[in-house]
Image: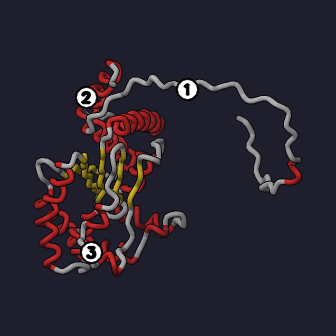
């Protein structure tokens, strides 16, 4: 059951999402991010308790910040009821299935959150631009996709769709950074090379996708992503404002029991395969 304080906090979150932009320092950003991440935990608790089902789609151009936003969302959530789905290239068997079949297999059960790092909209983007689907398959996707999403929502699934946008110049800068950073080089694939050389084709595909699938009941929410930090805060704040969660009264507070005490002689440390202590940390 929601508490009056929880209802007030929820109302405050909605008002923040609707207010004028606030300029923050990096330190203030980290503090606000932590506050929003705490609020996400309250949201998850409500979804688990109410048996809700939440699906969030993350789409956008390469380097737009999808991975970073998802990482910040799941940072403190319980992985038992929240998972990220990032499907690889379909197998030959999956290519012979109904297109939506492999995505439907990952939809949430009661009390679960599923975040799709790219989704069924691959057909309207990369598959269309690079010729991985036929014209007939593409047109059928545009026709059927709104019906598919309508069916999900009629089943009680909350569906939220985000498009993370990035400018030409900022994408160029991020691509260069990926190529020079061994920690991020895996993110740059042959597909990314083609995406960069077919910028206008992707823009046209995205605009047509929006024309068919940006519906009143299942709209696309566009997040300006040139500033990664601002994009993360704006996206999370918006998500919290549209999911109708409440902070719950917790009557299951735990207390630590006394530690068990009885005589027991443990084996010596020398019998264990210890990891070498190559590092120690000096207290500040």
29 or 216, which is in the foreground? 216
- Residue located at (24% from left, 31% from top): 19
Which percent across, then down, holds residue 79? Answer: 47, 48
Query: Residue tagged by mark 1?
Result: 254
Which percent across, then down, holds residue 271? Answer: 87, 54
Q: Along the horizontal axis of the image, is 278 left or right of 198?
A: right
Query: Residue tagged by mark 2?
Result: 15
Residue 25 at least partly seen: no
C-alpha span from label 1 to label 3: 48 Å
C-alpha span from label 2 to label 1: 33 Å
Disc 2 is placed on an element classified as helix
Displayed quadrant of residue 233: top left
Q: Along the horizontal axis of the image, is 212 left or right of 4?
A: left
209 or 201, which is in the foreground? 209
C-alpha span from label 2 to label 3: 45 Å
Say if mark 1 contacts mark 3, CB within 8 Å.
no
Q: Mark 3 or mark 2, which is nearer the start of the sequence? A: 2
Say if mark 2 contacts mark 1, CB within 8 Å.
no
**Count of numbered circles in the view:** 3
| The C terminus: image quadrant | top right
With respect to residue 236, does 163 lie above or below? below
Say if mark 2 contacts mark 3, CB within 8 Å.
no
201 or 265, which is in the foreground? 265
With respect to residue 66, does 27 lie above or below? above
Displayed quadrant of residue 139: bottom left
Query: Residue tagged by mark 3?
Result: 97
Q: Mark 1 or mark 2, which is nearer the start of the sequence? A: 2
Judge the density around disc 3: few (<14), some (14-19), many (≥20) Cα neighbours within 10 Å.
few
Disc 3 is placed on an element classified as loop
Disc 1 is placed on an element classified as loop
């Amino acid at each position: 059951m929601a508490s009056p304080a929880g209802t007030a906090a929820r109302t405050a979150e909605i008002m923040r999402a609707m207010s004028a932009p606030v300029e923050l320092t990096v330190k203030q950003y980290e503090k606000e991010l932590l506050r929003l991440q705490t609020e996400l935990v309250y949201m998850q608790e409500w979804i688990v308790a109410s048996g809700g089902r939440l699906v969030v789609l993350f789409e956008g151009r390469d380097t737009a910040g999808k991975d970073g936003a998802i990482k910040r969302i799941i940072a403190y959530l319980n992985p038992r009821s929240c998972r990220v789905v990032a499907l690889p290239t379909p197998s030959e068997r999956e290519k012979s299935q109904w297109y939506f079949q492999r995505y439907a297999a990952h939809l949430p059960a009661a009390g679960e959150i599923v975040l799709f790092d790219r989704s069924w909209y691959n057909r309207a983007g990369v598959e269309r631009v690079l010729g991985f689907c036929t014209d007939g398959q593409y047109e059928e996707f545009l026709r059927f996709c709104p019906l598919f999403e309508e069916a999900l929502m009629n089943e009680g699934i909350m569906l939220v769709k985000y498009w993370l946008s990035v400018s030409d110049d900022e994408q160029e800068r991020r691509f260069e950074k990926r190529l020079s950073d061994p920690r991020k080089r895996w993110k740059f694939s042959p597909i990314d090379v083609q995406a960069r050389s077919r910028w206008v084709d992707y823009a046209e595909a995205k605009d047509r996708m929006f024309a068919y699938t940006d519906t009143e009941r299942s709209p696309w929410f566009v997040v300006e992503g040139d500033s990664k930090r601002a994009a993360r805060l704006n996206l999370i704040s918006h998500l919290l404002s549209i999911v109708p969660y409440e902070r719950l009264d917790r009557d299951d507070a735990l207390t630590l029991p006394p530690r068990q005490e009885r005589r027991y002689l443990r084996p010596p440390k020398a019998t264990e395969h210890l990891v070498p202590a190559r590092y120690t940390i000096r207290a500040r």
